[in-house]
Amino acid sequence: MKPRFSDIWRWDGTSDRGTYLFWGVLIFAMKYNLDRTLGWLWFDKRWTVFDWEHLRLYLWQTIPTQGDRPYYLVLFATSLPFLWAGVVLTLRRLRSLGWQPWWVLMFLVPVLKLIFFALLCVLPARAKAVTPDTQSIRWRDIFGDFIPRTYIGSAIAAVGVSGAGALGLTWLGAVVLGDYGGALFVGLPFCMGFLAALIHGYHERRSLWACVSVANGTVLLAGLGLLLLAIEGFFCILMAAPIAMALASLGGALGYGVQETICRHNDSPKLFCAAFLAVAVAMGLEHGAPPPIPLFEVRTSVVVNAPPQRVWRTVVSFPDLPPPTELMFKLGIAYPVSARIQGTGVGAIRYCNFSTGPFVEPIEVWDEPRVLKFKVTQNPEPMQEWTPYRYVHPPHLDAYLESRAGQFRLVSLDSGSTLLEGTTWYHHRMWPARYWQAWSDPLIHRIHRRVLNHVKSLSERNDP
């Protein structure tokens, strides 16, 4: 290892793993302490190296709030030289491995950048991968006997070992740490796909299709294991499957590319350990410095052929809804059943009863017959999970999807009818937040639609 200052600004040439690790740690320390100094001098923000609240900025690339934008803009401006250094160092490292330069994009992805950095610090340069030594013989003796040489045998071993690792790390993240974060839903499937491809190609080179296939086989086996071990239910596994398979495929593609770089029997075990440890460390970091919880808004509207005053009476309190016809509700997603209210005006308590329990909604705005707004102080479980057992209660059913406030707005139309608009503000503690929003928004829209259509039906058939 011979670090030179030119390593951090020139993108030609190559970089060995020791130099890459040295500059990576040094650049992070310099940037971290520069941000601490700027925050103290210009923005009166005092934090230490042990302040987990600010560590999330470097781990998860958070989106700033309106008030903090000047502060984050300064941090972004000062980060440009460090970003350049990180990119050119990674390009030089990729060149030494014989990889395509587009892999540098991994350096910019939250969670995966931690795992990617760890792998680049372990992999040897291509030139060193051609000559096995006594160390490689020892690794062959330890690992080679457990991995079949046949195509089918190595595929089964790849799926089995990686799937078992996925189950263990999922249990650590979801049950022990109680975190459904990026390390679990992004880092873990990527690493499991990567490890499956490495194991499948341990004795001989495999095709890209074979590496991606065993990577996705790992996802399927892990999902089945989570269901049978009662760690998760069917719905969570089903919703996580698209992102898990996509990232596992990316990991399998990386494993395919690594085959040309490593001396298999010497370097594969190191990569196994690095990937497992990187995911576990990422889970620990995410538990200590969780990403901020975004607040989402879902708004649905319907036109009711009745005046606002009549619609208002039904909105405030309505009788039981008919049984649901939608498949999602029949399969276990919580759905509204009825609503009642205690009192009138601001301070009254509205109870919106769902199939899994009541929402408790203290009224904050009572502007009859225009606006009814309330906060939510109690949420029922969002679903009843499907499971082969009599009952299963995965951690994500407790406070991981919560409604924070709601509102009904009634607008009188020229035709004498009413535009009825329902809004829910909610958050969830699952990441990537935008991915899970793509599931939760449509579900909440369907819940809104069920309530609004019921109000519409009751209001339109009432006598004036």
Image (cartoon, rainbow, N blue to C red):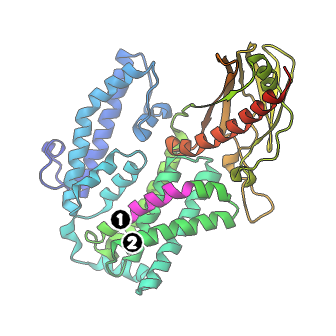
- Range drawn in magenta: 240-255
The image quarter in which residue 267 lies: bottom left
For residue 263, side relative to residue 461 (left or right)? left
Residues packed near mark 2 inside 10 Å, few (<14), some (14 to 19) or many (20 plus): many
Q: Residue sitting at 37 percent across and 72 percent down? A: 209
Magenta span includes 207: no
Q: Judge whether 256 appears above or below 413 on screen.
A: below
On the image, the x and y values in percent for residue 254 come to: 34, 63
Q: Which amino acid, by three-letter code, is at mark 2?
A: Cys
Q: Judge whether 250 appears above or below 285 on screen.
A: below
Question: Foreground: 354 or 45?
Answer: 354
Is residue 232 among the parts visible in the rendering? no
Mark seen at residue 328: none
Question: Which type of secondary structure does the marked residue at label 2 adopt?
Answer: helix
On the image, the x and y values in percent for residue 190 come to: 44, 59
Residue underneath mark 1: 253
Residues at circles 2 and 1 in contact by the CB criterion of under 8 Å: yes
Residues packed near mark 1 inside 10 Å, few (<14), some (14 to 19) or many (20 plus): many
Mark seen at residue 211: 2
On the image, the x and y values in percent for residue 27 come to: 28, 39
Question: Foreground: 267 or 223?
Answer: 223
On the image, the x and y values in percent for residue 86 come to: 26, 43
Is residue 235 among the parts visible in the rendering? yes
Q: Judge whether 7 appears above or below 232 on screen.
A: above
What secondary structure do most residues of the magenta stretch adopt? helix
Q: Which amino acid, by three-letter code, is at mark 1?
A: Ala
